[in-house]
Image (cartoon, grey):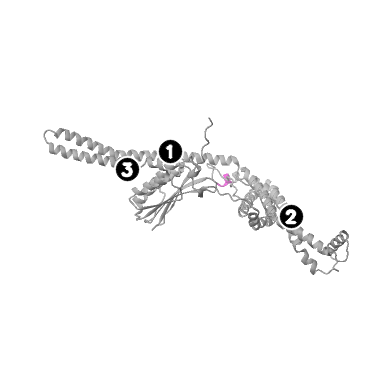
Amino acid sequence: MTNAPAADMPASTAPTEPRTTYWRLWRAVPRELGFLLLALPLAVVSFTVVLTLLSGGLSLIAVFVGVFLVIGALITARAFGTLEMTRLEWAGRPPIPRPMWTRTGDATGFWPALLRVLANGHYWLHLLHAVVVNFLLSLVTWTIVISWLSVAVGGITYWFWDLIAPNGDRSDFWLYRIELRWIASDAVPTTPGALDPGILVSLFFLLLGLVALAALPLLTRGLTLLHDVIARGMLGAWRSEFLQREVADLSASRGAALVAEDQSLRRLERDIHDGPQQRLVRLQMDLAGAERRLDDDPEGARRLLAEAMQQSRDTLAELRALSRGFAPPILQDRGLVAGLGSLAETSTVPVRVSTDLEPGTHLPPEIERNAYFVAAELLANVAKHSGATDSVLHSALRRGEDGGLWLDITVTDNGRGGAALVPGHGLAGLADRLRGLRGVLSVESPAGGPSVLAAHIPVPPPRAAPLI
């Protein structure tokens, strides 16, 4: 998380994994039960539709029409597989990473698209899931759930039906009920004042129903997890695809970082050339002129020296302004919160600073430095282009959906709005810089304002200390 001690990290950023308690399981029962009860009807539909298309396609494969039916079966299986993953998310399970159906560089067109369907292993796994695995799994889990609910509801309500049913009824159910009475009467001899065997049977069924009802959350969770494990293995993305995406993201991030760094160096070179360098040339000329006039025109020499002093002061001020592009000492000494506060003080537009970070919080140096630069760029954009009279700079740490830690730097202003990520402009360069950090820049700036620009930067986990 950070290299600082744990005390430096705000308590609000600590991971809050909810403990799985019995009552939490009960709260998930309606969704899990709905998922399990719908599993078999949907499995029957997917089995029927996909198998019909597949068998028709295989039987007509010789006349080429069958190829299109087989492809239709694969696409339909993909749709049912996506529906299954969506239903699992609705039931409360973590999202299943979606497969890569197309890859960068794939040929476009009708026939290449058909070939990609036939050559993609994910389609065939979805087909196997729809025709065989999910049908059998749903049949088993649906039967277990229906039987379990029958035991729970029937056991709890048995005493009611026992009271209202006529004893002379000889239907199969009541024959079963009378046989239970006979068993109970044999086990407990009838004596004056003894408990009615029928009451013992009702108590037995009541106890059985209560046990089944109490175990219902464990049953629904277990069966839902079984569906989730199978769907995650058959319908989700493969580990090799994660590696491909990681490599692609790293390549894009590296390219964006190089572009952003090149643009920053060029801008710094241009600023130094147009500012301090020209002033230093002028300063050198003034000093040379003063030296020549020192004996013949002392007053003129004094004027040139005064101008040189002013040039030196202007040059120093401009160099200080440029140095804000480097990490200031306050950032290293007092942390990001103090650094952002110093940025707000130097802004030409009034800036109110708010933060969820504790004072003295230290993040990895490269994260603090880049966050400082990003905040400086955002505030400079407000000052140059927004026409705002008020702005807010907010910083916070949060847990992302992937469980990782993210730093958010948000600037809100009351300007005219209309900010956009236009190639070649400041915000686009800032987005490239963030992409190099594997972060993202979000821009919400409707015409008329207000504008909300937010930078989201991932915070890497702490590096393990080397063993000595």
Q: Name the residue that disc number 2 marks.
A: 143
Q: CA distance from mark 1 to mark 3?
A: 24 Å
Magenta span covers which residues? 109-113
Is 232 on the left or on the right of 466, as rendered?
right
Specify which label sits upstream in the sequence, 2 or 1: 2
Specify which label sits upstream in the sequence, 1 or 3: 1
Is 206 on the left or on the right of 260, as rendered?
right
Between 333 and 261, the one lying in front of the other is 333
Q: Position of residue 165 (x, y in %)?
A: 81, 68
Label 2: few (<14), some (14–19) or many (≥20) C-alpha neighbours in 10 Å: some
Mark closer to the observer (2, 1) = 2
Q: CA distance from mark 2 to mark 3?
A: 74 Å
Q: Which residue: 76% across, 61% down? A: 206
Is residue 258 something one can see in this rendering? yes
Q: Residue furthest front?
A: 193
Q: Is residue 259 magenta?
A: no
Is residue 429 something one can see in this rendering? no
- Confirm or deny contact between disc 2 and disc 3 (CB under 8 A): no
Q: What numbered label is drawn on residue 258?
A: 1
Is 187 on the left or on the right of 138, as rendered?
right
Q: What numbered label is drawn on residue 175?
A: none
Between 214 and 454, the one lying in front of the other is 214
Q: Is residue 110 magenta?
A: yes
Q: Name the residue that disc number 3 marks.
A: 321
The residue type indicated by label 3 comes to: Ala
Q: Residue furthest top?
A: 468
The residue type indicated by label 1 comes to: Leu
Assign a secondary structure to mark 3.
helix
